[in-house]
Image: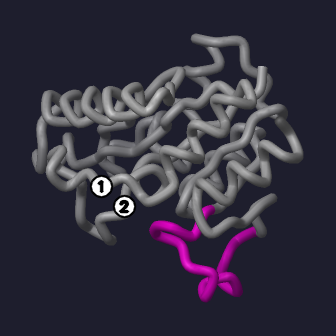
Amino acid sequence: MKVIFLDRDGVINEYPGDTFYVTHWGKFKFIPGSIEGIRKFNEKGFKLFVVSNQAGVAKGLYSQKDLDKMTKKMRHTLEREKVTLSGVYYCTHREEDNCSCRKPKAGLLHKIVSDFSIVPEDSFFIGDSFRDMKAAKEFGAKPVLVLSGKEKISNRSKWEFEPDYIFDNLLVASHYLCTHYG
C-alpha cells in the first residue's frame, strides 16, 4: 500500500504563524494547489492520512467540538472536489504532557499502522516543520519537507538532518512523488 502522511497546518492549509492556531473554520484557508496535490495522490492510488498536533484544544483555545467541526468541513470541502483522505489523526495534548502521540514522537503513526496494513519504509511524511521530519524518521517513513509553512530554506544550516525531499508546497511534492513512486 502506497501511503502519504500529511501534516495539516502549513501543508494543507495556511500556517497561522508561530504561537497562533487555526481555531475555527473561518481561519482555515487551503493553500493554493493543496487540494489539487491531494487529488493527484488519490489518482495514483496513494492512501492519505492527516497527522497533526492540535495542542490548542488542551490549551483551551478551541474545543474538541470546534476541531471536529473544522475537520468535518475540511473533509466535506475535499469530497466536493472529489478528493479523499483515508483518515485524520490529531494529538490534542500540550508539549509538557509528554504523550507518545505528539510529534516529533511517532505514536499517531504507529496507531495508523495498527488500524491499517502499512509498511513504514514504503510511506512518505509530508510536513512543514522539523517536528514532522523527526516523526517521519523515528517512524521509518521518508521525510518530505514543504516550504509552505513553518520551516524556511534559510534555516538549512541549522537543520539536524537533511530531509529526503524538499519542495515548495504540496502540489509540487505530489507532481514529483507521483511521477517517481506512483
User: Residue 63 at x, y = what percent?
Assistant: 12, 36
Nearer the observer, 56 or 72 = 72
Determine which of the numbered discs, if any, sits on residue 62 in the image: none
Instruction: Measure how far apart labels 2 and 1 are at the Cα level.
Output: 6 Å
Q: Is residue 141 above or below residue 19?
A: above
Query: Contact (CB < 8 A) between labels 2 and 1?
Result: yes
Nearer the observer, 173 or 88 = 173
Q: Earlier in the sequence, mark 2 or mark 1?
A: 2
Of the 4 image quadrants, the one containing the C terminus is top right
Give the left or right position of residue 150, taking residue 163 as reference: left
- Which type of secondary structure does the marked residue at label 1 adopt? loop
The residue labelled by disc 1 is: 29
Q: Is residue 113 above or below residue 107?
A: above
> Where are the magenta residues, as a range?
146-161
Q: Is residue 171 above or below residue 74?
A: below
Residue at position x 69%, y 49% from top?
174
Q: Residue furthest right?
A: 180
